[in-house]
Image: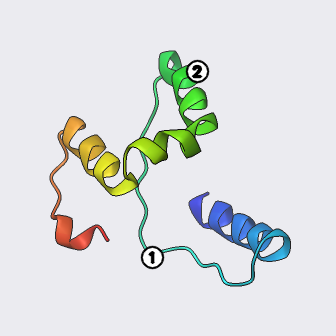
Amino acid sequence: LLRDLKADSSEWVHREITKQFEWQKGYGAFSVSPSSIEPVRRYIKDQKQHHAKIDFKDEYVDMLKKADLEFDERYLW
């Protein structure tokens, strides 16, 4: 599923925006409970404004910590 999503979205970006786009090798995925769907939709809708306040990298590390996941920041970026 993720392979198809990355392939299809890459094709769209190349066609509509820029040829100079490629996905990074890794990815992060988080599950969402049904009760959290609306807040996640709002987050996605307001992402541009949100990331003007908090850096994506800081937010991602915070999400990993809140999920109590072990990670080595050297391998995240």
Mark 2 and mark 1 lie on one chain; the one further toward the N terminus is: 1
Q: Residue 64, image x and y in percent? A: 25, 46
Q: Count residues near mark 1 (Cα–Cα under 10 Å), then give few for <14, some for 14-19, many for 20+.
A: few
Q: Position of residue 31 (x, y in %)?
A: 44, 37
Q: Look at the picture and state if 51 lies above or below 9.
A: above
Residue labelled with disc 1: 25
Q: Nearer the viewer, mark 2 or mark 1?
A: 2
Which residue shows up at 59% across the image and 35% down it? 46
Residue type (three-letter) at the residue carrying disc 2: Glu
Q: Which quadrant holds residue 38? A: top right
Q: Position of residue 62 (x, y in %)?
A: 25, 43
Residue 5 position, x and y percent, is: 66, 60
Furthest-right residue in view?
15
Q: Quadrant of residue 21?
A: bottom right
Q: Secondary structure at mark 1?
A: loop
Q: Residues within 10 Å of mark 2 (few under 14, many from 20)?
A: few
Residue that appears at 28% across and 67% down: 76
Residue ID at (49%, 21%): 36
- Amino acid on which disc 1 is placed: Lys
Where is mark 2, residue-wise? 38
